Amino acid sequence: MIEKQSLNLFISYCHADETSKETFEKFLVTLRKNGEIHDWNDRLIDVGDKFDSEIKKNLEESDIVCLLISQDFLNSEYCMNEELFRALNQVENGKSRIVPIILDHCMWLDTEISNYMAIPKDGTPISEFSSENKAWMQVIESIKKVVKKLEKEPLKKKR
């Protein structure tokens, strides 16, 4: 039996949204435990490693780039000018999929991010849900669909 290879999921977020990133990681647990994804974010950089080069390396290896969108994300020079810029280039080259996750009300519709289908449904911010867990479940269900699609139709990767 051929063992399937995990997809690399890169989490792009602003450190002001650390709590949301941690919640997102909790909801990714079943995809991770089932071997469907290997998720990565900058908090996994080892002491002594170069911050910028580690982020770029992991972003380039990603199949899915999840953008945790808030006004803080949009205000972050690094998130917008480095991570988003590189993710958009990878999408153009057929090497990654972008998944915008809208955390709170912000000006994301005035950016390049508006060209991509956002989650939760209709780009409704997670903060708008009476139960944020319900919103995160909607996010994970959507990501599971992307994972299943990429398992059937892999991206152009240099592996």
Image (tube, rainbow, N blue to C red):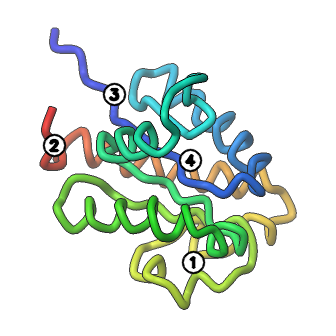
Secondary structure state at the residue bearing disc 1: helix
Q: Earlier in the sequence, mark 3 or mark 2?
A: 3
Secondary structure state at the residue bearing disc 3: loop
In the picture of the structure, the residue carrying the numbered disc 1 is 122
Q: Distance between the residues labelled 4 and 3?
A: 16 Å
Identified by mark 1, the residue type is: Asp
Residue at screen point 51% across, 65% down? 100
**Label disc, if present, on residue 157 of the rendered structure:** 2
Q: Distance between the residues labelled 3 and 1?
A: 28 Å
Labels 1 and 4 touching (C-beta < 8 A) = no
Q: Earlier in the sequence, mark 1 or mark 4?
A: 1
Q: How far apart are marks 2 and 4 (CA)?
A: 24 Å
Residue at screen point 34% across, 43% down? 62
Quadrant holding the N terminus: top left
Between 119 and 83, the one lying in front of the other is 83
Labels 1 and 2 touching (C-beta < 8 A) = no
- For residue 24, side relative to residue 31 (left or right): right
Labels 3 and 2 touching (C-beta < 8 A) = no
In the picture of the structure, the residue carrying the numbered disc 4 is 140
